[in-house]
């Protein structure tokens, strides 16, 4: 069984990481990828094509970005 991205370790400040963002970035990207794979798999199980699922996820991301920009 593959390990979840959540089981990855986060670098400590003593490991010469410049910012907490840089320390968390590998985990964030791994979790984002894991979530996308699970969402696509769920959509395919429900009868949607992977292409449609990816397009829907991209649309959700665009909507989120637009909402963030307009709320500031």
Image (cartoon, helix red, strand yellow):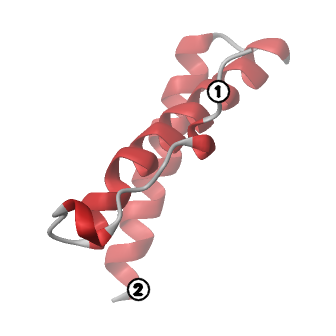
Q: Quadrant of the N terminus?
A: top right
Question: What label sits on residue 23 in the rendered view?
Answer: none
Horizontally, is 28 left or right of 3 in the view?
Answer: left
Q: Residue at x 28, y 71 (%)?
A: 13
Foreground disc of the pair 2, 1:
1
Q: Nearer the viewer, residue 33 or 11?
A: 11
Q: Earlier in the sequence, mark 2 or mark 1?
A: 1
Q: Position of residue 48 (x, y in %)?
A: 73, 15
When the figure is inspected, residue 7 is found, relative to residue 67, above or below; the finding is above
Q: Nearer the viewer, residue 24 or 44?
A: 24
- Res 26 quadrant in image: top left
Disc 1 crowd, CA 10 A, few/some/many (<14, 14-19, 20+):
few
When the figure is inspected, residue 11 is found, relative to residue 38, above or below; the finding is below
Callout 2: helix, strand or loop?
helix
Question: What label sits on residue 71 in the rendered view?
Answer: 2
- Report the residue marked by disc 1: 3
Q: Is residue 30 visible?
A: yes
Q: Position of residue 27 (x, y in %)?
A: 44, 48
Badge count: 2
Q: Residue at x 52, y 42 (%)?
A: 8
Q: Position of residue 12 (x, y in %)?
A: 35, 65
Q: Residue at x 53, y 48 (%)?
A: 60
- Res 41 quadrant in image: top right
Q: Residue furthest bottom?
A: 72
Callout 1: helix, strand or loop?
loop
């Amino acid at each position: 069984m593959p390990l979840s991205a959540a089981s990855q370790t986060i670098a400590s400040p003593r490991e010469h990481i410049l910012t907490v963002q840089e320390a968390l970035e590998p985990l964030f990207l791994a979790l984002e990828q894991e979530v996308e794979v699970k969402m696509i798999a769920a959509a395919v199980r429900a009868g949607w094509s992977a292409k449609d699922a990816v397009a829907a996820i991209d649309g959700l991301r665009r909507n989120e970005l637009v909402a963030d920009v307009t709320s500031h």
